Each structure stands twice: as structure tokens, then as C-alpha cells.
Amino acid sequence: MARTKKDNNANINNLSNDSINQFEEIYKKVEASKQLTKKKQQIESELSNINLKINFANNNGDFLIAAQQRESQTRLEKELLTLEEFRKQSPTIATDDELKAFESNIAKEKQHIAEQIKTLGDDIEYELHSLDSKYQKYIELKNELNRRIARSQYVTNELKKIGDLSNLFNRVHKDYTIHFDSIRSSSHFMYLLKNNFDQIEKAEAIDYITGRKDW
């Protein structure tokens, strides 16, 4: 089946940056939430230690120490409740709704970009396959050259030593052109293409690494 080229209007300048812009605010809020989680874990660890001290004091009849530890326990429990209330109400902490809205928005952008990538990928494959006919002619000419090289070698050998029984004409396909600098193999073209693509990819990565483009 013949391949057909698809219309491709992919343009990086037309991409929506809503999720990129929203992320900065989301990032600040998530990092703030992580600090709250860290504080919560510290308080819970202290409460766990206090609980051990209370049990130990009660078991040893040190009821005053147990009572003092319970006061610390009550204070920390209040801090824990205050912390959780702050997490629910503070505008500096990302809510579930904000995170879900971001996820929904970025999912749409990813899908849109993925579709453009596929279209461009199909277009690249089409362009590469458009070289098939040229390469077909290239190989045909190379084989025609090899046919003549085989005959030339046969006659040259005969001129060197008339009637030499070891001088045989090769009637089987053989690639003599590997000795010609001007003749390139499919591996050469493949390497050239891969090298060009790798250089493009590397240059794009360097733009981000060096800060010429914002990640």
C-alpha cells in the first residue's frame, strides 16, 4: 500500500503553557505541604516516645512523672490538631481539587503534544520512505557497475596471462564496489542519518542544560 503524506501543522509556538505556568504555584504548595508532613512526623515521633515514658513511669509508680508527661502529650496532641487544621484551610497548601485540576489540564496538554509527535513521526517516516525509489536506482546502478567490474577483471587477468586456467568469470552476484571510495553502503547512509538526528537531540538537550531554555 502506498504511503501518503499527512498534513502537519505542528508548531511548538502554538502549544499551551497553562500547565507549565500553573506548576510553579503547585510546586510551592506541595513543598509547603511536605514541610507540614515533616513537622507532623516529628510530633508523632515525640508522642510515641512520651507514651513509652508514661507507661514506664506508671509501671514503676512514678505517677508525678507520668502526669508531667501527659501534659506534654496533651500539648503535642493540640499541636497536631492545629497542624492538620492548618493543612485543610491554608491557601499555601495545595488542595485535592487544585491537584486534580492540574492533573486534568496537563493530561490534555500531554495528549495534544503526543498526537503532534505522532504526526511528525509519521511525516518523518514518509520522508524517509520517499528515498526508497532513489536508493533502488542507486543499488541498480551499483550492480550494473559490478557486472562490468567482473568482466573487466576477467579480461585484465587474461591479458596478464593468456590461457590461465585459474582465470574464471564470476557469474554470481558479487559486490566489487566496496573498494570504490565513491560508493557508499546502506550502513553509511544509516550512520549519517543517525548522527544527524543525534546531533539535533544533543543540541536541544544542551539548550535546557545550559539554561538557554527553561525546563
Image: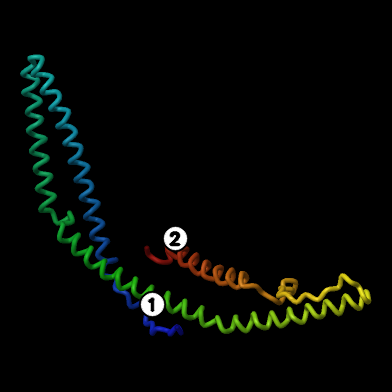
Is 106 positioned to the left or the right of 155 in the image?
Answer: left
Q: Nearer the viewer, residue 176 or 205?
A: 176
Is 64 positioned to the left or the right of 5 in the image?
Answer: left
Which residue extends farthest front? 165
Could you tell me residue 121's position as x and y percent? 42, 74
Q: Quadrant of residue 132?
A: bottom right
Judged from the image, the secondary structure of the residue bearing numbered disc 2 is: helix
Could you tell me residue 131's position as x and y percent? 55, 81
Q: Quadrant of the N terminus?
A: bottom left
Look at label 2 and name its amino acid: Ile
Q: Residue at x 54, y 68 (%)?
A: 194
Look at label 1 and name its amino acid: Thr
Near mark 1 (Cα within 10 A), the count class, few <14, some 14-19 or many ≥20, is: some
Give residue 132's mark: none
Q: Residue at x 58, y 70 (%)?
A: 190
Q: Nearer the viewer, residue 22 or 136?
A: 136
Q: Which residue is mark 1?
A: 119
Q: Which residue is mark 2?
A: 209
Q: How is the image coloured?
A: rainbow
Could you tell me residue 35's position as x and y percent? 22, 46
Separation of residues labelled 1 and 2 (CA atoms): 27 Å
Is 195 positioned to the left or the right of 36 in the image?
Answer: right
Where is 39 relative to 205, above or below? above
